[in-house]
Amino acid sequence: MKRPPWFSAIPLVAVFGCVLFAAPFSSTCRAAVVRIELTSGDTVRGHFAGVAGTAVRLQVDGESARRTVPVDQIVSLQVADARESSGGPATSVTLVDGTSIVARDVAMDDAMVTLQPPRQAELRLPINQLQSIRFRPGAPATDPQWLGLVDKPSRSDRMVIRRGNDQLDPIEGVVVGLDAEKLLFELDGDPIEAPRDRLEGVFFRTTPVPESSAAVKITGIDGSTFLAARLEPSEATDAVEILLPGQVRHAIPLERIKRITWASGQILLAQTPAASTRMSPYLATKLPAELTTDWFGPASLGEDLVMVAGGAAEYRVEPGFQTLAGSVGRDKLVTAGGNVIVRVVVDDNVQWEQTLTESESKGFRIPIAGARRVRLEVTAGTDGDVGDQIRFLKPRLMK
């Protein structure tokens, strides 16, 4: 078809998957609309216009000039009309800094991992930046076992086999490769090709993690969570850019983002004063309640919280925190013990409960948006409280 003579004289710019006509014509589409919540409590709404240093730029309707909002005045940025992604890939890749990326495909050799997030550019990362790869979606039967392995240090890689009864069995060795069908694994020097459909996932050997300065959390519509020190300066109006571990720059399309949150990302409960603690011994004593709690009540040890049966600790939840995470297992000083029941209570409602019978850890990740208080408590089973001393590993509130 022959073009009209005036067609070639109009410059076209492709942006956001649509065509913008140069001035004096108006655009046929605009950048994504976002809603910014400020530390003052006010909100501002406009079209995202990029990131300039330590500020976000907006084009607000009715204003001829772009508005610049400093990030130290921003609590969160919400993409208007963001919708949860339904179905899709189940593989989740977690990095050492806490970033969790949902991927359609993951492959690796002995040095690098390649992953393909939905509708994003391919990512190549050094293996030493990986914490784990989980091949299956979360499930009530397996989540406590999988999350219990997250904070458990290891000097070897761990291949996690999923047995027929939904039990997870970690095997230590060395990961040497991964493709669409199998995990290449060395066990005591012998190579093994483990079918991916028989595995829950793989953990990589623990390496020292530098102090994190993540001040930005990007939550994706597909369940991905990106952590970064800042948003990288960019003129792009259809994406934000961040720097991932290994100095890998990555652009995340706004259409894949649900929310961006600024400020401190997490609070460790063991390093936070409890709103209240209590201790109710299995066997009644004549000791004053306050003295019993002082002697035998919950105690903080570094990033962990140690508690014996009958103990409980409650913490206030400040606005903005979305998740309570951590894991729990018998304290390393205990060589043997009976059954012990651990509960996580949110605003007086039990949200998580597990009976510990062995030394393995169980993990939890509980939504707490809008909650006012959380309580960790330990109760003896029917076999008494001998050996019922447990350790909460890095219990933390996260935004």
Image: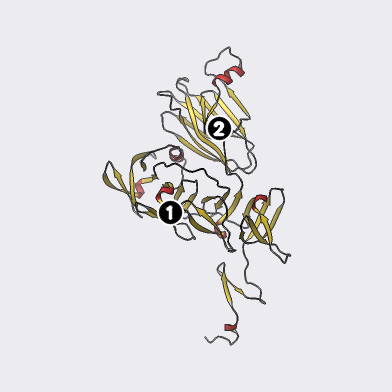
Residue 25 in the figure: left or right of residue 328: right
- Label 1 crowd bin: few (<14), some (14–19), many (20+), radius 10 Å: some
Image coords of residue 263 (percent x, y): 61, 46
Image coords of residue 188 (percent x, y): 27, 41
Q: Nearer the viewer, residue 328 or 186?
A: 186
* Residue displayed at 39% across by 38% down: 154
* Residue displayed at 43% across by 54% down: 125
Q: Does residue 279 sit above or below 48 in this rendering? A: above
Disc 2/disc 1 C-alpha distance (Å): 33 Å
Kind of residue at badge 1:
Leu
Q: Quadrant of the C terminus?
A: top right
Labelled disc at residue 292? none
Disc 1 target residue: 125
* SS class, disc 2: helix
Is label 2 in contact with label 1 (beta carbons under 8 Å)? no
Colour mapping used in the image:
secondary structure
Kind of residue at badge 2:
Ala
The image quadrant of residue 11 is bottom right
Count of numbered labels shown in the rendering: 2
The image quadrant of residue 116 is bottom left
Whichever of labels 2 and 1 marks the residue nearer the N terminus, that label is 1
Residue 356 in the figure: left or right of residue 233: left
Image coords of residue 239 (percent x, y): 56, 61
Image coords of residue 387 (percent x, y): 45, 22
Residue 122 in the figure: left or right of residue 194: right
- Label 2 crowd bin: few (<14), some (14–19), many (20+), radius 10 Å: many
Disc 2 target residue: 270
